[in-house]
Image (cartoon, grey):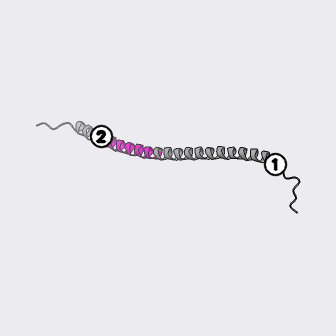
Amino acid sequence: MKTPPESFLIFKEELKKARLEKERLQKEYEAKLSEMNLELDRLKEQISAQQELMKTTLEYAIRLEENLDTFKVEVANTPTMKKKSFH
């Protein structure tokens, strides 16, 4: 059997190195993509928690405003005690 030319053997070796490098880069890419997806999920969770906190805060502020309005009405409707003295 005739031995292949040296240039073919060199090309074959370079092709093998290129395939290995491609596989390494693909694994690295997939690892980084997975890491970024985890980070994105964490950020989504934080945003959701902050939105819920803002919603709760707004509901509380609205309730306080309504209570303040009710209190103002009660104070306005309460008969004044101008003639009574505390002394």
Taking depth in this image into account, of 4 and 78 the one nearest to the observer is: 78
- Report the predominant secondary structure element of the magenta stretch: helix
- Tally of marks: 2
Quadrant showing the N terminus = top left
Give the residue pinned by disc 1.
79
Give SS at disc 2: helix
Q: Does residue 73 appear left or right of residue 80 in this picture? A: left
Taking depth in this image into account, of 85 and 4 the one nearest to the observer is: 85
Give the residue pinned by disc 2.
19
Q: Does residue 16 appear left or right of residue 53 in this picture? A: left
**Where does the image place residue 27, in percent across and percent down from the top left?**
35, 44
Q: Does residue 22 appear left or right of residue 6 in this picture? A: right
| Nearer to us: label 1 or label 2 | 1
Query: Residue 70 — which label?
Result: none
Give the extent of the magenta segment.
Answer: 21-39
Q: Residue at x 53, y 44 (%)?
A: 47
Tell whether position 30 is magenta.
Answer: yes
**Where does the image place residue 23, in percent across and percent down from the top left?**
32, 42
**Pointer 1 or 2: first along the chain:** 2
